[in-house]
Amino acid sequence: MNQITTMPGPAAPAQLLTDSKRPIHTPAGLVGDTPVLWIGAPFTATGHGFWAKLEGHNPGGIKDRTALHMVRAARDRGQLLPGARIIESTSGTLGLGLALVGATYGHPVTVVTDPGMEPLMTGLLTAYGAEVELVDTPHPTGGWQEARRHRVEELLAVHSDGWSPDQYNNPDNVAAYAPLAHELVAQLGRIDTLVVSVGTGGHSAGTASVLRGYFPHLRVVGVDTTGSTIFGQPATPRLMRGLGSSIYPRNVAYDLFDEVHWVAAPESVWAARQLARSHYATGGWSVGAVALVARWLARTLPAENRTVAVFPDGPQRYVGTVFDDPYCREHGLLGHLPADDPDEIAHPGDRTVTRWTRCAHITDPLAPPRDRDAAEQALAGAAR
């Protein structure tokens, strides 16, 4: 005799809506409230792990937040007029955010990039209505970033009402990430260690400064790429995009960092691919580098330490690079199992690093020597 299973009756409409997101009227409403995921074994050692803030759940990635905030602030101040063109240098993610802002507020958008941008990203930006300007020659000292910034200046001279966010130096880039910090506090309650990639300096400074207000003893770990100048290393050719810089962004808050790790491209690729296979949640260069460092911290810090890593985007734009075997073989990125522990240097200027390396001595490379000496003495006193 067949057993009849009685299904519960339909819930009241109000009950059904309790856990649902409200309808959204503009694309801007899609940004924020991203989830947090536990990353444990087998990516980490058994019994150890960290929390990952999945910013790839924003439509375009973490920089949707800063694009919206910078544009809203500029409109409120009258710096960006209705219908005026937005022109900015980007390696990709901010471009997606600006395209979203353009659709929301009715601004045409021009993004200036370089040959390193993935074809998929160029296609997406074009599909979303942005004009893509490509520079073809790097600046002799500032590399592609400085070349892009020069092209932005040229375009601003042509478009008299044009406006550039200048993500590298605009304090609104930093302020944009207060909501991300507040989300983390609401989601996790307590945070002991924050691991963040550093490029323009916006999300590291904005998130860490707010969290320090809640947790004065918060440990902030910056993640850079080999070949980047941000923390005092010499500029060398860089394959990784989204973190690192060939210039010195003034939004980098050097005083917030307790240590910095430089990660090489093969090490980032290994971590991103391992994450994909073990936890499904992954991303590109920045995510791989941040995850590698967070993995080490989870193993070496006390088990009760609550570590959070910010994953700036998802894997989609990297299907032709990080997750493409022919590309990775061409650039020698496969078969490089990272060391269990980073190399160590006492000062960023000790030597040029080419593999995962850690330094607990943080100074601003552009600070006057007198200020730099005072900062170093303060750090030495704190260590004693």
Image (tube, rainbow, N blue to C red):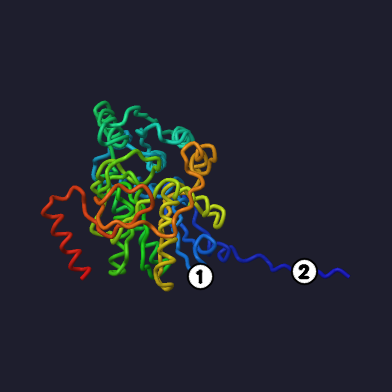
In the image, what residue occupies the spot 54% across and 62% down? 42
Task: Using the image as rendered, state which of residue 320 and residue 101 is in the foreground.
Answer: 320
In the image, what residue occupies the spot 25% across and 51% down? 350
Task: Using the image as rendered, state which of residue 218 and residue 184 is in the foreground.
Answer: 218
Coordinates of residue 343 in the picture (x, y in percent): 36, 56
Residue type (three-letter) at the residue carrying disc 1: Gly
Say which quarter of the image contains residue 297.
Answer: bottom left
Q: Is residue 214 above or below residue 162?
A: below
Name the residue that disc number 1 marks: 47
Task: Using the image as rendered, state which of residue 343 and residue 97 is in the foreground.
Answer: 343
In the image, what residue occupies the spot 22% across and 54% down? 363
Residue 5's mark?
A: 2
Quadrant containing the C terminus in the rendered view: bottom left
Mark 2, residues whose alpha carbon is within 10 Å: few (<14), some, or many (≥20)?
few
Coordinates of residue 315 in the picture (x, y in percent): 50, 47
Q: CA distance from mark 1 to mark 2?
A: 41 Å
In the image, what residue occupies the spot 52% across and 41% down? 319
